Image: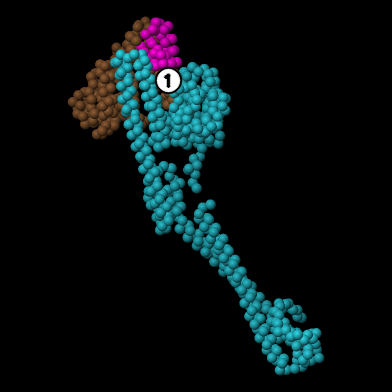
Amino acid sequence: MKLQVKLALYNTLTKVAIILFTGLLILLSIEKISYNHIELRLENDKEQTLKNLSSSEISSILGDKKAYTDYNILKEEFITITQTKYNPEITREVKFTTETRDFDKYTQTYRILTHRLNFNGHTYILHIGVAIESVEELKSIIKKFTIVVLVIALVLTLISDLVFTKFLLAPFYKIIDRKLIKVNDPMNFDYQKIKTTTQDFELLDDSISSLMKKISNLFILEKQFIANVSHELLTPISIISSRLENILLHEELSEGSENKMHASLKTLNRLKSIINSLLLISKVENNQYDKADMVMIAAVVMEIQEELEDRIEERQLTFSNNLKYIYTIKGNRPLMHTLLFNLINNAIKYNNAGGAIIISDELKEGIYKVIISDTGTGMDKKQIENAFNRFEKLDTDEKESYGLGLAIVKSITTFHDIKVQINSVKGEGTTVTLIFNVPNPNLIAA
Amino acid sequence: MNVLIVEDEKGLALEVDEFLSHEGFTVEHARTKKSAEEKIFVNNYDFILLDLGLPDGDGFDLLKMLKGLDKRDDAVIILTARGAVDDRVSGLEQGADDYLAKPFSLSELLARMHAITRRKHRLESNDINIKGLKVNIQNRTVMFNDERINLTKKEFEIFNYLVLNKNRVISRTNLTEHVWGDVLEINSDSNFVDVHVKNLRKKLSQYIPIDWFETVRSIGYRINI
């Protein structure tokens, strides 16, 4: 979830909570306040009534009747006095209830004060009621009003929050988009500062920029290092090998020495191969090759097949080229050649005499696969896991494996965004699958 | 034929010098760009072996300067450890005749120099006679009494290289590199070349005895004449 959405969600939830809380508080307090108010009035009325009662004869009010009732004209208030069973214990307590009473035509809701009093050896119950319809009406109006005001406040603050966070986070998203998502290579990084007044974002921007600066400096260093190493290592090798060749040419050597010289030359050659392979890997990883060629896979395979024909014949292998599609990728032709050469050469190298090599392809939903399978020695799980590591060698009769062939394959496939899979069964053979045109996960915008 | 070696590595220059002198070339040295420029202004050379990384500048500048001079047809072979592909391409584009990545074998250097000589002079007398076999480098054919021996492209390459470097043991690795170039610098299998040599000898032996075509055990091959 994006930060902006999270913030908006959090804001919404807290606001809703606050509004619910304040709404309830207001509504409850309205209830309380209005009832309090009414009850105070009723208390006053009761006091007034009692004063009146003590000064005038209660019997004269009641007369012969057992009860006395009096409503005012609009039935807004009433007072009743009824005689009950005598109870000598006087309580001063006052009870409040809310009740509905029916009159000839309509009902009214009253807040009623109930009080017992003793008078001249009789016990009377005094009810004083005040209609609370108006209060209820007021309450509902206030409720509605509160809700409307709160909802409007909620919407307004939410909108303002969203707008503000959007504005606030805009530089942040710019940083992410321009400096992280769109950058695959530190060499072409955009060092322009993103405009922002937020200190943290400035810090983030600066950190990313300085980090990228460091990385690209390291890249440059590595490139220089590679160029230097190649020169500094290959030159001495060149000197030694020339020297040995000259000794072989002009000196009278014993056969043993001559053999040793040749063995040394071979060793030098091995050193050269290792250095060149490592250089190739580093150069590919450093994007020092361009990808401007249109490479037709089938043509490259044909070429390699011709190059390796003699070896295939020599080892009595059946080589089936079952490529059905003319598939072209944009890439570096020499590198693609090296890639397929190494794979096919491995299929020959690790095959049993009289075995088979099958190269096939498939095209499904725009994804193109080239499958190179052999019937050779195969690899177990652990060997497959380590297959792409540098200097990882399989036990083989071939003495001239430096364990760099698949490391080179790995770097070239990565460079071309090709996925490579190895399936193998020990003793039965190996299948290498190259998967082209897989959407690059780095390029999917977040 | 005179050769100028432009190379700051004294050791390497000396070895190339020794080898080429032995092959009958006259050799001069230049260890800096500046001294190379002076020498190039004064003399015409048949070959300039040019290292790109010089202490006081880039070999490419020398190449540009040379190509800017009138009436020069010095053949330039770039020798460098900067094995970058674009170096190779731009070297050839700027008028170098060939390009060798260090470390190279001296016999390979010789073969390239011969090839350039042939291209430049269109030598008619390109037939090399070996025990009654006529090797014509122009047409890439081997004849025996006007009958053409049917060799594949690679078989001819191997034979030609061995003939050119006659009386010298040529290792399998060296042959492999010469015939296949860089493609096998990774995991090169030296027995690659054996199959071809075997076929080549079979074909030649149908015409003449080939005891002069030696296999040097565990090393390589030699043509003794």
Q: Residue at x 32, y 19 (%)?
A: A245
Q: Is residue A83 magenta?
A: no
Q: Residue at x 53, y 62 (%)?
A: A158
Residue A73 position within the rendered picture, expressed as x and y whole percent measured from the top left: 71, 86
| Chain displayed in brown | B
Farthest residue, direction left: B42
Residue A109 position within the rendered picture, expressed as x and y whole percent measured from the top left: 71, 77
The reply, left or right, for residue B79 in relation to residue A184 is left
Task: Determine the secondary structure under disc 1.
Answer: loop
Is residue A289 shown to the viewer in this render? no
Is residue B55 shown to the viewer in this render? yes
Q: Is residue B216 magenta?
A: yes
Residue A361 position within the rendered picture, expressed as x and y whole percent measured from the top left: 54, 29
Q: Nearer the viewer, residue A245 or A209?
A: A245
Residue B209 position within the rendered picture, expressed as x and y whole percent measured from the top left: 39, 5
Q: Examine the rendered structure and indicate whether residue B104 appears above or below residue A144.
A: above
The reply, left or right, for residue A314 in relation to residue B109 is right
Q: In which chain is the residue bearing label 1? A: B
| Badge 1: residue crowd in 10 Å (few <14, some 14–19, many ≥20) | many
Q: Residue at x 46, y 56 (%)?
A: A169
Q: Which residue is mark 1?
A: B190
In which quarter of the view is residue A66 placed? bottom right
| Chain displayed in cyan | A
Q: Residue at x 45, y 15 (%)?
A: B195
Chain part drawn in magenta: B194-223
> What amino acid type should be assigned to the residue bearing mark 1?
Ser
Q: Examine the rendered structure and indicate whether residue A29 appears above or below residue B147.
A: below
